[in-house]
Amino acid sequence: MLSVEEVKKVAKLSRIKLSDQEVEKFRQDLSSVLDYVGDLQKVDTEGLDIVANVTGLENIDRQDQAVDSPNQEQILDNAPDSKDGYYKVHSIL
Amino acid sequence: MQFEKLSLLELRQKLDNKEISSVELTKYFLDRIKARNPELNAFITITEDQALKQAEEADAFIAEPGGNFALTGIPFAAKDLFNTKGIKTTAASKILENYISPYDATVISKLKEQKAVLLGKTNLDQFAHGSSGETSYFGATKNPWDKERMPGGSSSGSAAAVAAGISPWALATETGGSIRQPASLTGISGWKPTYGRVSRYGVAAMASSLDSMGAVANSVKELALIAEAISGHDPKDATTGSQEVGEYLKNLNTDLKGLKVGIPKEYFIDGMHPEVKASVEAAIKELEKQGAELVEVSLPNTKYGSLVYAIVCPSEVSSNLARYDGIRYGHSSSEAQNLEEVYELSRAEGFGDEAKRRIMTGTYVLSAGYYDAYYKKAQRVRRLILDEFETIFKQVDVLACPSVPNVAPKLGHAANDPLFGYIADQLNIPASLAGLPALSVPCGFAKPEDGQTDMPVGLQIIGPQWGEQVVFNVGAAYQEVTDFHTRKPQK
């Protein structure tokens, strides 16, 4: 079973604010998922390569050339806040 | 005329012969959606105005000499995970509730080039995280066969819309069962392509090493036609293969003589519904009657598929969903006092429990100290599963087995069960991990243990990598001698 501190740490790393009640709920949920996958540890995987992708493709290059993309206005229309063509955020320092 | 009973090929003929216009056909299906959607909740957005405009353009195009692609003027629906320019694209989430996409997914562009007509965007499990349709921010979709039951998921709305005959076909997506499982539970045909056959560009990402864009329709023949339209290499998705797209429909070969069909014994699990088992076994016998040679095979690592998936999928989810930051697009918390809180509160308010669970599971198994034990271990076991399929496909041409071990459960079964999906999709996940093409085709009915209405059963056909043609061949051959795919729910 994960500890309360471990859940709080993983929530922090995930940038998701949790209430105390949610910490407890996800402590149970995450623990049950980790229990569920426990049997994998029993599988002998000595010498096997990891599967990063199944296509066999590697290093797909393209020319570094500018292409048309949707205009700035349409993209910024979806931003919660913008000003003068920039995203607007809270002050950082 | 009941147009929902006609195939896409028959609709093509009627349009080309000017027996009906695309506008009439579009209005017909829009009316059906408006009548049935309140009870089914299959659509999140109905794009009536755009659809009628597209239909007018399609009619003008059909009037020109040679103006007919396979799907010109034929209405369809798209899972609300596909970006559609100028139209809301929500991923059935609160965080994208008001997001209007500034661009089209490649698959949508291809269908626009064909002048197909988009009826609307269908419901799904939020961000495609789920196997019930219940995790949608916009409420659960109902199974048209029994509205107390789930249609499966995550492509819940696409499956329900086709099963109810309110859309002739629909785009769907699969990461680990999200096409085959709902197709099975709603009694329709579903195609999960080879990974890399169809572009992922512009489709909200879930687990990028698994995500495959496919379709649901009323028959395998129609899926073959759709596959030709949406497959192919896309420079915007570097994982698409450059293998030529076959003329799947024209090359359909339903003569199964000499074809070796493997029956993987591990797919007939303990606890399987006995009538589901009987239906699938009867379907396999049909293939034998048509000349196929049945070969019993063993895939002993099948049992690890869902376990590998329960690590790989959340890991990739945690990475892909990091982009929802409350700054560039999507929900932004009005309570946030500083930048840190913009992230933490926007994500807390915007994501549902299932998304949070997957993000945090993924973050945990990828974090320092756990990466080797969980993530790398899972990706090594995934290698065993890949190797096992590769060996089997040296012995047989396709595999035939159940799509799902049961029929559709009642709504509410998935709620608060963090393992529901991993278990529901256990027979679909291994092929997903290996990137293989597969179908689910209706093959009978079974009475649920907790109900009186007979519910659909699906036969799963799995092929080797890039083997779309052989799975279409077997599925179409089966549908030539059976009529389960033509049976529809009473209203």
Image (cartoon, grey):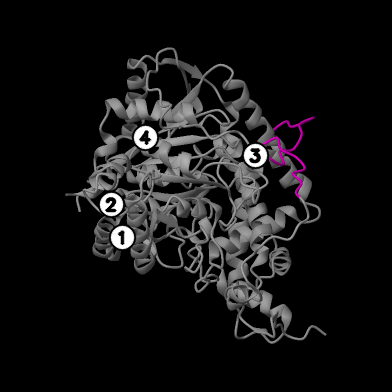
* Residue under the image location 34 percent in, 50 percent down: B62
Pointer 2: what residue? B164
Q: Position of residue B274 (x, y in %)?
A: 34, 32
- Magenta segment: does it hold A48? yes
Viewer-proximal residue among B68 and B5: B68
Mark 3 lies on a secondary structure that is helix
Q: Do the residues labelled 4 and 3 touch (CB within 8 Å)?
A: no
Q: Position of residue B440 (x, y in %)?
A: 41, 37
Mark 4 lies on a secondary structure that is helix
User: Which of the 4 quarters of the picture holds residue B412?
Assistant: bottom left
Q: What is the three-letter code of the residue carrying label 4?
A: Lys
The numbered mark at residue B40 is 1
Which of marks 4 and 2 precedes in the sequence?
2
Spatial CA span between label 2 and label 3: 41 Å
Which of marks 4 and 1 precedes in the sequence?
1
Viewer-proximal residue among B264 and B16: B16
Magenta segment range? A43-62
Mark 4 vs mark 3: in front:
4
For the residues beneath circles 1 and 4, the answer to whether they share a chain is: yes
Q: In which quarter of the image is the C terminus of chain B?
A: bottom left
Spatial CA span between label 1 and label 4: 27 Å
Q: Is residue B289 above or below residue B472?
A: above
- Chain that bears disc 4: B
Q: Is the magenta stretch mostly helix, strand or loop?
A: loop
Mark 1 lies on a secondary structure that is helix
For the residues beneath circles 2 and 4, the answer to whether they share a chain is: yes
The numbered mark at residue A39 is 3
Q: What is the three-letter code of the residue carrying label 3?
A: Asp
User: Which of the 4 quarters of the picture holds residue B276?
Assistant: top left
- Magenta segment: does it hold B243? no
Q: Is residue B338 visible?
A: yes
